[in-house]
Every structure is written in structure tokens, then in C-alpha cells.
């Protein structure tokens, strides 16, 4: 019963990751022997097994928040990361421990992405072969959507289809690379290059790099909003000018001498402040017309209230999508000070560096990697060209280049708040994103970042940037990953239903403002009508209709007498 559970990792109902150690260096990393272990799950193994704890720590940090269990033929060990010790389970406890039900095992990818200034060495490992197949399907769909065709095989694929793409898009395009590679890559050779990786690798660009800090507020709102604001200010100033000129005209009797003297002694800046900030219209604007004044004040305060309600969503409502500078080579990437997301391998390396265990980690690395090699079948392992080369070079990567100035941020949304201090200090930020939880087409707001779902680069000013980004987002959002998995593995066990998740609030749109603005316009129009009516009644002697009404009233009075 238990032997079959160890071949591949298992996600059981308690959110444990369970797999078996087989081909590893037993001198460096070994499960506790029966002599040093206790049977009770509540007791712990001897802390003399520091090497094994290091292995567990590496796994724990990589699978953040997941309870990890490593099994040998004699039993299983579980690492308690809080107490930093190991709990041993003998063979007699297997039936009790393995509360077994497969849940979402196919959504747990594993990747190593070493990186240095000379090139990119990319190694992907997957728990199952399906991930490579799904990636091929996604890239095929994206390539087809931009009118190009390509062929892929298990492992790494590089297909020269630039001429074909260029013909269909009527552009002189020489070379297109779609695939992954373990060798050094000079992206300047290509017009278009895409590297698909099991986790979402993103390029993050600070907003301050695109726009001077003093101009950030002007980038928040779109052009129609600024037109509306400009018209409002112009109308207000014009009304002030008209009524100022009307003081000596026929409307002078509308205003008392106190109102006029108060207006003359008030600066224009104070008037604007009182109108826009305090919601208080100038007395000269309405004079003694009390009904119009009340309605106008209601209109002003309604505008302030609605503006306050929508203030939080206004940046989402009417923001502009900003184009990002593209990169050609890794040198360009360093010079532009872009921030690159990498998987948690780097986070794990940082963790050990902070504990002063980097040297010991490098010494045990072959042991740690052996844990993951067991998860792959022989064919996939053989397809990982350059894997041994990576192991040989690992010692040079970890201490200096991998963990320098790295900070880990766990984030569930594409908006990353509070990064300005890190950006200004020049430190590097690592952001982990799961592609299955990604949401695309984000708006850019001040002092925040935008992420891309995959690592890819284009030539500067490439016409394919926007086309590829939008198509990739559409494919992922439409569920092609799940569809590809279901089509290739129809007999796969059903994943347990995910935990209930609160629906994200729908972002504000222009439609949400239609009713409030209609109400404001209706109130303003009503105020205007009452205002005009009061002006006419104030000077009714000069109006024929009111003169006739007055004569009719006098006639009725005399008749009654």
C-alpha cells in the first residue's frame, strides 16, 4: 500500500507533500536510523541529524507553507519548521498518517533558474510530463494567433519561423525563437524571443522610470477627465467675470451693498478655494436668490460626496496603460535597472545565506537535487540537457550572484504596494507569482508596478509586443491550461475543489458614473431654472406677463370691493 505512494509526490488532504528518497548520498543526507529515532509522532529525532534538517529546510523554503514529508523504505520523516526538528513515523504508522486524497498535484511546478551577467541557464523540472505538453499547446495557440505556425517537441524547441511570420505580417522579420534553452542566449540576435517557464517570470518596471515624479499626477487620469476638469474651471471663472461686470448693470438690484463690498474685498484665490474645497459658492454668484442658492449648494456638496466615493476607484477607472521599455540583452537589463522575478530557488538560497549556511548548502546541493530527480521519469530527466553542467556551476552562483541584495515579497495581486523604498535604495525585489492565479491587463498607477506573466524579450519598438501580450493574456484567462491538461490526461484523478475564494470586487467603470452624473446634471438644471425664475420675479415690473397678472389682481380686488 505504501510503496506506490512514494514514486511521485502526493498532495494529501492535509496539504502535505510526500515523496521518497532513493538515489541520494546517504553519507550527507539520510533519514534517521531506528537507533536515533522514536516511534511516537509526538517525539522528535535527535538534532544530531543537522544535515537532514538542512535538506528539509531547503524543501520547506521552496514549497513555502507546505508540510513536507520524506519517506524511506523504513518509514517517513516530517520536518517541524517551527521547532526545527524531525518527527519520525515508522512503518506501523503509515495507515494513520496517509489520509490520502489527491488534490491539485498538477498545479505544483518546480524550477531552477540560475542567472548571471553572461547569459541565462534555464532548467525546468516538472512533477509530471503534462506541463511540457501544456506549454507547447499554449505557445502553439499564441503563435497561431499572430499568424505564424511552428512545431514543438518534448524538451526544448527552437524553430526558425521568422520569414513565415514576416510574410504574414508584411514585415521584414528574419528570425523568431519560441522555446527554452540551457545555453547562453544573446537576445539581440532575435527579432522576437520567448522563454516559457513553469512559474510566471515577470519583468517589473518602476513607474518613476517612465515619468518624472512631478508629472505622475497628470498621468493618473485620462484625457477626457482632464477635459471635464478644464471645462469646469473655465465655466466657473467665466461666471465670476460675467456677474462682476453685471454689478453696474440692470442686475445690480439683486445684490446688497454688503455682498458687493464683501466680494470686492475677497481675493480670487480665496474665492476659488471656498468654491472647490469647501463647497461654498460666492455670495455674489447668487445674491438674494435664496432658493437658487440652496439648490446650488446641494449640487456642489453632491459633487463633493460622489467625488469622495469614487476617489479610491478613480485611478482604476480612468488610468492609462503605459508601454514599457523593452530589452535586448542582459546588459541592457542591468543598465535599465529593471527588476526580474525568479522562482523561490533564489529565496531559499537567501534564507541559507542569512543563516550562514551557504557553504553547507552548496556541499549538500547534490543531495537536495536528488530529491527532485526522483519526481521525474527517465525520459524527462534525459531531456534536461545541461543539467549536469548546471550542477557543476552551482557553486559559483549561490554565494555571490544569487543572494546579493535580494528581498522576497509574497503577493497575491499584480499591484505591489510599498516598494518605493526598495526601488529608491537600489535593492532588488523578488516577486513570486503563480500563473494559475494571474490576472492580466492591469492598469498602472503612481508608485506601483506592473507584471508580465512570462519572461520574454523583444527588440526595441517591436510591433509584436502588444500583440503577443494581449493574446497570451487571453489564452491564459480563457482556461487553455486546464483544457490542455484535461485533453491529454482524461483519466487523471479529479482535483479536490478549491477552497471558497472571495470574489474580487469589480473595478469601477464609466458606466458606474452615469447615474450619479445624471443626477448632478438634473440638479444643476433645476437650480438654473429656479435661479432664472427668481431673477424674473425680482424684476417682474419689466416683464409683460407679470404686469398683466398684476393688473388682473387689481381688477379682482376692486370688484370685490
Image: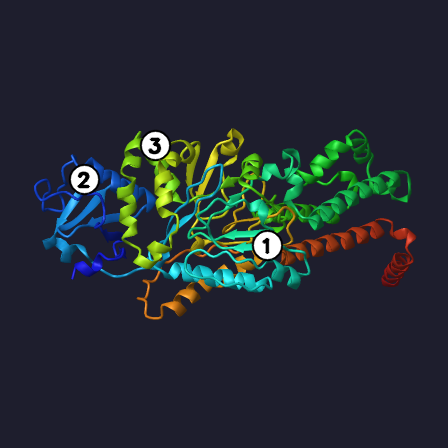
Residue at mark 1 = 175
**241 and 253: which is toward the camera:** 241
Q: Mark yes or no: residue 64 visible.
A: no
Spatial CA distance of label 3 from label 2 is 23 Å
Q: Residue at x 54, y 61 (%)?
A: 142
Is disc 2 surrounded by few (<14), some (14 to 19) or many (20+) residues within 10 Å? few
Left or right of 369, for residue 525: right
Q: CA distance from mark 1 to mark 3?
A: 41 Å
**Residue 165 x, y percent position in the rendering:** 61, 60
Q: Is residue 132 left or right of residue 68?
A: right
Tell which tag, 1 or 3, sits nearer the viewer.
Answer: 1
The tag on residue 353 is: 3
Which of pointers 3 and 2 indicates the residue nearer the eye?
A: 2
Image quadrant in which the C terminus is located: bottom right
| Element carrying mark 1 | loop
Determine which residue is flagged by label 2: 27
- Asked whether the viewer can see residue 44, the reply is yes
Residue 362, image quadrant: top left
Secondary structure beneath label 3? helix
Residue 43 place in picture, x, y as percent = 12, 42
Please name the residue shown 90% across and 52% down the image: 541
Amino acid at each position: 500500500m505504501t510503496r506506490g505512494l512514494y514514486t511521485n509526490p502526493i498532495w494529501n488532504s492535509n496539504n502535505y507533500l510526500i515523496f521518497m528518497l532513493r538515489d541520494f548520498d546517504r553519507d550527507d543526507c539520510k533519514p534517521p536510523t531506528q537507533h536515533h529515532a522514536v516511534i511516537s509522532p509526538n517525539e522528535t529525532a535527535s538534532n544530531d541529524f543537522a544535515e537532514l534538517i538542512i535538506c528539509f529546510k531547503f524543501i520547506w523554503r521552496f514549497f513555502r507553507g507546505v508540510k513536507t514529508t520524506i519517506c524511506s523504505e523504513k518509514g517517513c520523516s516530517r520536518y517541524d519548521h517551527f521547532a526545527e526538528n524531525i518527527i519520525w513515523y515508522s512503518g506501523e504508522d503509515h495507515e494513520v498518517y496517509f489520509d490520502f486524497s489527491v488534490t491539485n498535484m498538477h498545479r505544483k511546478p518546480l524550477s531552477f533558474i540560475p542567472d548571471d551577467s553572461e547569459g541565462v541557464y534555464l532548467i525546468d523540472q516538472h512533477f509530471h510530463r503534462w506541463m511540457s505538453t501544456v506549454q507547447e499547446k499554449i505557445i502553439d495557440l499564441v503563435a497561431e494567433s499572430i499568424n505564424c505556425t511552428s512545431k514543438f517537441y518534448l524538451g526544448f524547441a527552437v524553430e526558425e519561423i521568422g520569414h513565415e511570420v514576416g510574410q504574414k505580417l508584411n514585415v521584414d522579420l528574419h528570425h523568431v525563437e519560441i522555446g527554452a534553452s540551457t545555453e547562453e542566449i544573446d537576445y539581440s540576435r532575435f527579432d522576437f524571443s520567448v522563454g516559457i517557464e513553469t512559474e510566471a517570470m515577470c519583468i517589473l518596471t518602476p513607474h518613476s522610470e517612465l515619468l518624472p515624479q512631478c508629472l505622475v499626477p497628470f498621468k493618473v487620469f485620462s484625457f477626457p477627465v482632464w477635459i471635464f476638469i478644464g471645462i469646469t474651471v473655465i465655466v466657473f471663472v467665466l461666471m465670476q467675470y460675467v456677474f462682476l461686470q453685471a454689478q453696474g448693470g440692470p442686475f445690480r438690484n439683486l445684490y446688497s451693498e454688503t455682498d458687493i463690498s464683501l466680494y470686492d474685498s475677497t481675493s480670487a484665490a480665496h474665492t476659488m478655494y471656498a468654491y472647490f474645497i469647501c463647497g461654498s459658492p460666492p455670495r455674489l454668484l447668487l445674491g438674494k436668490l435664496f432658493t437658487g442658492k440652496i439648490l446650488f449648494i446641494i449640487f456642489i456638496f453632491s459633487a463633493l460626496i460622489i467625488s469622495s466615493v469614487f476617489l479610491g476607484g478613480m485611478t482604476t477607472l480612468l488610468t492609462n496603460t503605459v508601454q514599457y521599455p523593452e530589452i535586448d540583452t542582459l546588459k541592457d537589463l542591468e543598465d535599465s535597472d529593471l527588476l526580474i522575478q525568479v522562482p523561490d530557488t533564489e529565496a531559499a538560497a537567501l534564507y541559507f545565506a542569512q543563516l550562514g549556511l551557504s557553504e553547507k548548502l552548496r556541499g549538500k546541493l547534490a543531495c537536495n537535487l536528488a530529491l527532485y530527480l526522483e519526481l521525474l521519469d527517465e525520459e524527462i530527466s534525459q531531456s534536461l540537457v545541461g543539467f549536469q553542467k548546471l550542477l557543476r556551476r552551482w557553486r559559483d552562483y549561490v554565494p555571490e550572484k544569487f543572494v546579493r541584495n535580494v528581498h522576497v515579497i509574497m503577493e497575491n495581486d499584480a499591484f505591489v504596494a510599498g516598494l518605493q523604498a526598495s526601488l529608491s535604495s537600489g535593492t532588488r525585489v523578488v516577486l513570486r507569482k503563480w500563473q494559475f492565479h494571474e490576472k492580466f491587463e492591469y492598469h498602472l498607477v503612481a508608485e506601483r508596478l506592473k507584471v508580465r506573466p512570462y519572461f520574454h524579450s523583444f527588440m526595441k519598438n517591436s510591433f509584436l509586443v502588444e500583440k503577443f501580450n494581449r493574446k497570451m493574456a487571453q489564452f491564459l484567462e480563457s482556461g487553455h491550461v486546464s483544457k490542455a491538461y484535461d485533453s491529454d490526461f482524461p483519466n487523471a484523478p479529479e482535483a479536490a475543489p478549491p477552497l471558497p475564494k472571495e470574489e474580487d470586487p469589480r473595478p469601477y467603470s464609466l458606466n458606474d458614473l452615469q447615474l450619479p452624473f445624471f443626477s448632478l446634471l438634473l440638479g444643476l438644471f433645476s437650480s438654473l431654472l429656479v435661479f432664472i425664475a427668481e431673477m424674473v420675479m425680482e424684476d417682474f415690473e419689466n416683464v409683460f406677463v407679470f404686469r398683466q397678472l398684476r393688473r388682473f389682481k387689481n381688477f379682482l380686488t376692486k370688484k370685490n370691493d
